[in-house]
Amino acid sequence: MPLLELKNVDYSYPSGDDDYIQALYSVSLAVERGEFVALVGCNGSGKSTLARLANGLITPDRGFVTVDGMSTDKKENLYDIRKKIGVVFQNPDNQMVTTVVEDDVAFGPENLGLPPAEIRERVDWALDCVGMREYAKSGPFRLSGGQKQRVAIAGVLAIKPELMILDEATGMLDPEGRAEVMKVVTDLNRREHMAVVMITHFMEEAATADRIIILDRGHVVADGGRELFERPEVFERAGLMLPLPVRLAGALKKNGFDLGCPLTVEQFVAETKRALTERKTDGGGGSR
Ligand code: ADP
Ligand code: MG
């Protein structure tokens, strides 16, 4: 049974008196335990709507959303659903509820009604995971954007969810802050086998996922492994820019220099080196 499943989900927001805006059209997808999925799409494509549906903040107009088999449209399931799925939103300032970091991280486990000793243990563990233990007694407002976002992640982690959804959680951070958050999340996925759905419009981040789901105007238009990056037209049609190394490799390929499909700068460099060495051993580059 998938950890999260959406089946033929439609969702509309009311707009004006009788009008509505349809945000999702017959969306079906599943996320399994331990997976690392990137969910990408332009502004307004329905990504945040999908995140809200996943933890039962909203329920579908048609179709169903289940978490470990439990439907989100049954109120009595919501407590268990929110233990399994944690969502980190874009702006960390809106997520801080107290004035001390450790109290903020304790908020989730307290709401679960856990015993104080267990809460203490989880708070310390979560702050360790994100490398923020030394800031336990600080006020959140004295922290940098990246640090605040790491505290917000710790708050969700302290619930020990099986799936963490990050809704453009790195969107407001500088490149260094983004890298900090990405590292924490990929480590948790690898070491703790926590499933991750990373909602992002940074294609370089999406390229680190095992699977990519593309939303375009409320429709899932692609769902597959990293080999999707070898089909640039799929991204272009959805209005997305490919990662820079993929674009460069594409331009070089058109000029007779095939590097395959390197997704990161490191892979790009390694492939370039390999291709150049092959040319030399070929006898000075026969194609020239
Ligand atoms: P994304 O996160 O990909 O930018 P959203 O899920 O926020 O997309 O939005 C999908 C569509 O739903 C957009 O057309 C947006 O304008 C609309 N929408 C989102 N939230 C609301 C809301 N609270 N009320 C009305 N329309 C909304
Ligand atoms: Mg959004």
Image: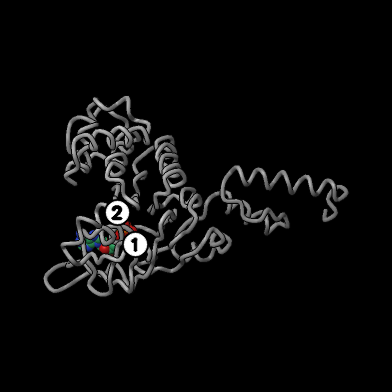
> At which x and y percent is residue 33?
40, 57
Horizontal arrangement in the rendering, residue 265 relative to residue 224 (left or right):
right
Identity of the amino acid at label 1?
Leu
Horizontal arrangement in the rendering, residue 204 relative to residue 89 (left or right):
right
> At which x and y percent is residue 3?
35, 60
Q: Is residue 183 above or below residue 198?
A: above
Considering depth in this image, is 285 or 229 the residue closer to the camera? 229
The residue located at (67%, 44%) in the rendering is: 270
User: Is the image coloured rainbow, by chain, by secondary structure, or in one colour?
Assistant: one colour
- Residue 234 seen by the camera: yes
Evaluate if marks 2 and 1 touch, with contact meaning CB atoms under 8 Å apart.
yes
Cα separation, mark 2 vs mark 1, equals 9 Å
Which residue occupies the extreme left position in the image?
17
The residue located at (19%, 46%) in the rendering is: 112
Mark 1 closeness class: few <14, some 14–19, many ≥20 residues within 10 Å: many
Q: Secondary structure at mark 2?
A: strand
Considering depth in this image, is 23 or 65 the residue closer to the camera? 65
**Residue 4: image tag:** 1
Q: Secondary structure at mark 1?
A: strand
Residue hosting label 2 = 85
Identity of the amino acid at label 2?
Ile
Mark 2 closeness class: few <14, some 14–19, many ≥20 residues within 10 Å: many
> At which x and y percent is residue 131?
37, 31
